[in-house]
Image (cartoon, rainbow, N blue to C red):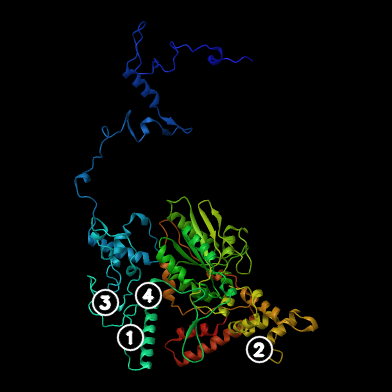
């Protein structure tokens, strides 16, 4: 096929009336050229613009006939004119001629008081925080707080030192970071930088007003006593500041032990790496990811050991660094404790945060509807967001992944009765606007937990213990003798019962067939078997809740964190399917409680109810 085109045929294009660069003379062009010859009845520019208005100004309708567009609906046009600086108009409002929107100090004080009460209320939600002048409200409250320990912004950074010709270089001021920790040397210096007197033996100390050691003590004993007193006072001051700032020691150096021998010395107790699970930087990194990405945080707590599995450091961190996030307590595994224990703990925790009683199960769950209803309420509170994220945090082996699987009614997260099954965080879709985030279990070693406490909390796997037999006596101190005998089919009294934990492990090993060569009982296997039963709920136990008055328990139910039209969340704890225990043990426990309460009523008839409740808690009976 021959090639065509002027490049090949050497024929240039016609530059006559068909030139593309020439302006068009179409009838829709208002600035077209008039022809030299022919009809002179041409449309004027006004006529062309009017016809364009007829065509372009029509309303655009959808299939139902509703007007959805058109030139007259454009926000930047008024009729057929575009709104500009010259053609635009100002809204007629008398507020343009009055004062601007200002607020006085009286209104700020009133708003600050109301805001403080609402923020402190766990059942109130502050909406649109970004539109509130939180900086103006908090700066005045921080000024001269606690005896001028904390100062305002202008006290630390004067205006003339920050802007203008006298501005100084931006440097970190350690005296602002170490607030309230001035030394004696600082008191001897004027504001001009001149030293008053140098008669003291200066020892740089960060704590506040430490005792200064004299240059020449009367004796060596007095000198050592003064040094010890100064160090002790420095430690007390650090503890006070740390508690106030929410800084708590945790990790490898959290436990202090007193050395034996000559002199008094305190050293950090070295923990084995096995008992440091859940405290690594990787785990804490995953935890902070979940906290940062979550709008609502579910703190899952084991109902059997509420004080041990409640992370107070995490609560302080969220209250200080992320107060806009909602923290909710989920009291899981309530089927493993009596109803009165669950009620007491719910009343205790509800005074601090909203609390939901929960039993994770794919078939017989409890609290699922209440928790979903609460999450839907948070979704309506944040209707300006397309979706909200709900992070699930807590200690290892408290049932975080089981709670998520119960909510979505399918096995989406890997679950196991051993700690450390969840390795990384993951997103799970609950609804189209609510997402759940599963988090690995974190261990906060703020209370200085011992190795026995870590095992009883379920943080450590029993099969990885070097000597699991050593952790059986703490279990026997918590679990009643009747429950141990009923679990392993042993006699609780008489000649056939056990004397100590070694004898008990031998009987359990022989009963379950855990034997070595020659028929010797395997104590290690029996101890692991017993520890697993304790962690997985086969051996009933619980930490006694504090005494709670009825009016205090009912107080949180009067207030609600709901919007108008949203029903409050209520739970009936009588519907909990408790674990079946020995009927004889329960009857005996009831008789003991009744007999003890009657005897105490005869001695002190003025306070019968209070004594009865104390007896129930102290005895630990499964009523």
Instruction: Give the side of residue 190 with respect to residue 408, left or right.
Output: left
Determine whether label 1 and label 2 are within 8 Å by CB.
no
Q: Nearer the viewer, mark 1 or mark 4?
A: 1
Judge depth for marks 3 and 2 and give the one in front. Answer: 3
Q: Quadrant of the C terminus?
A: bottom right
Q: Earlier in the sequence, mark 3 or mark 2?
A: 3
- Is 450 drawn above or below residue 142 in the view shown? below
CB atoms at circles 1 and 4 under 8 Å apart? no
- Name the mark on residue 213: 1
Mark 2 Cα shell of 10 Å, populated few (<14), some (14-19), many (≥20): few
Query: Which residue does the numbered mark 4 point to in the structure image?
Result: 241
**Of all residues shown, which one is farthest toward the right?**
518
Viewer-proximal residue among 482 and 325: 325
Where does label 2 land, which residue? 500
Kindly state the secondary structure of the residue where label 2 is placed: loop
Q: Is residue 93 left or right of residue 345?
A: left
Q: Secondary structure at mark 3?
A: helix
Q: Nearer the viewer, mark 4 or mark 2?
A: 4
Q: Real-space Cα distance between discs 1 and 3?
A: 16 Å
Residue 101: x, y in percent?
Answer: 24, 51
- Percent coordinates x, y for residue 376 in the rendering: 48, 56
Number of the label disc, if any, that sits on residue 419 = none
The reply to whether residue 559 is in sight is: no
């Amino acid at each position: 096929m021959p090639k065509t085109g002027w490049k090949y045929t050497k024929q240039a294009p016609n530059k006559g009336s068909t030139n593309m660069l020439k302006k068009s003379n179409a009838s829709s062009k208002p600035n077209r050229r008039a022809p030299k010859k022919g009809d002179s009845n041409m449309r004027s520019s006004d006529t062309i613009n009017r016809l364009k208005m007829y065509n372009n100004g029509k309303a655009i309708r959808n299939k139902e006939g509703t007007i959805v567009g058109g030139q007259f609906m454009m926000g930047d046009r008024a009729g057929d004119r575009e709104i500009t600086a010259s053609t635009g108009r100002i809204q007629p409002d008398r507020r343009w001629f009055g004062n601007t929107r200002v607020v006085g100090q009286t209104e700020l004080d009133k708003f600050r008081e109301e805001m403080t009460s609402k923020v402190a209320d766990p059942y109130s939600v502050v909406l649109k925080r970004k539109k509130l002048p939180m900086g103006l409200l908090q700066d005045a409250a921080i000024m001269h707080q606690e005896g001028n320990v904390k100062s305002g912004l202008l006290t630390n950074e004067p205006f003339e030192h920050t802007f203008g010709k006298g501005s100084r270089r931006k440097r970190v001021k350690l005296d602002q970071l170490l607030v309230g920790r001035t030394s004696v040397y600082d008191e001897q210096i004027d504001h001009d930088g001149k030293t008053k007197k140098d008669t003291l033996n200066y020892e740089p100390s960060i704590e506040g007003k430490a005792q200064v050691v004299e240059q020449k003590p009367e004796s060596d004993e007095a000198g050592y006593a003064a040094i010890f007193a100064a160090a002790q006072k420095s430690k007390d001051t650090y503890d006070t500041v740390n508690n106030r700032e929410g800084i708590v020691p945790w990790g490898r150096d959290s436990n202090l032990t007193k050395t034996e021998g000559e002199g008094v010395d305190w050293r950090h107790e070295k923990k084995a790496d096995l008992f440091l699970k859940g405290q690594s930087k990787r785990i804490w990194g995953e935890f902070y990811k979940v906290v940062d990405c979550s709008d609502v945080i579910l703190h899952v707590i084991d109902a059997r050991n509420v004080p041990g599995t409640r992370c107070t450091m995490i609560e302080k961190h969220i209250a200080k660094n992320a107060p806009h996030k909602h923290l909710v307590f989920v009291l899981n595994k309530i089927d493993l404790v009596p109803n009165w224990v669950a009620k007491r703990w719910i009343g205790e925790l509800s005074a601090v945060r909203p609390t939901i009683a929960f039993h994770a199960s794919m078939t017989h769950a409890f609290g699922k509807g209440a928790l979903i209803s609460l999450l839907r309420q948070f979704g309506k509170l944040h209707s300006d967001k397309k979706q909200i994220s709900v992070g699930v945090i807590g200690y290892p082996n408290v049932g975080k992944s089981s709670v998520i699987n119960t909510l979505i009614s399918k096995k989406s997260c890997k679950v196991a009765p051993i700690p450390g099954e969840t390795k990384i965080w993951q997103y799970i879709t609950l609804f189209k606007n609510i997402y759940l985030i599963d988090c690995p279990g974190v261990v906060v070693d703020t209370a200085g937990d011992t190795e026995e406490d870590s095992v009883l909390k379920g943080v450590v796997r029993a099969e990885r213990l070097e000597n699991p037999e050593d952790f059986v006596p703490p279990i026997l101190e918590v679990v009643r003798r009747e429950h141990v005998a009923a679990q392993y089919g042993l006699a609780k009294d008489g000649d056939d019962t056990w004397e100590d934990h070694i004898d008990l492990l031998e009987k359990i090993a022989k009963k379950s067939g855990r034997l070595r060569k020659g028929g010797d009982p395997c104590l290690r296997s029996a101890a692991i078997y017993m520890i697993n039963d304790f962690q997985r709920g086969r051996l009933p136990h619980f930490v006694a809740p504090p005494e709670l008055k009825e009016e205090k328990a009912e107080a949180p139910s009067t207030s609600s964190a709901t919007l108008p039209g949203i029903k409050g969340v209520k739970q009936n704890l009588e519907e909990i399917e408790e674990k079946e225990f020995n009927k004889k043990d329960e009857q005996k426990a009831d008789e003991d409680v009744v007999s003890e309460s009657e005897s105490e009523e005869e001695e002190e008839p003025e306070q019968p109810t209070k004594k009865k409740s104390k007896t129930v808690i102290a005895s630990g009976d499964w009523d």
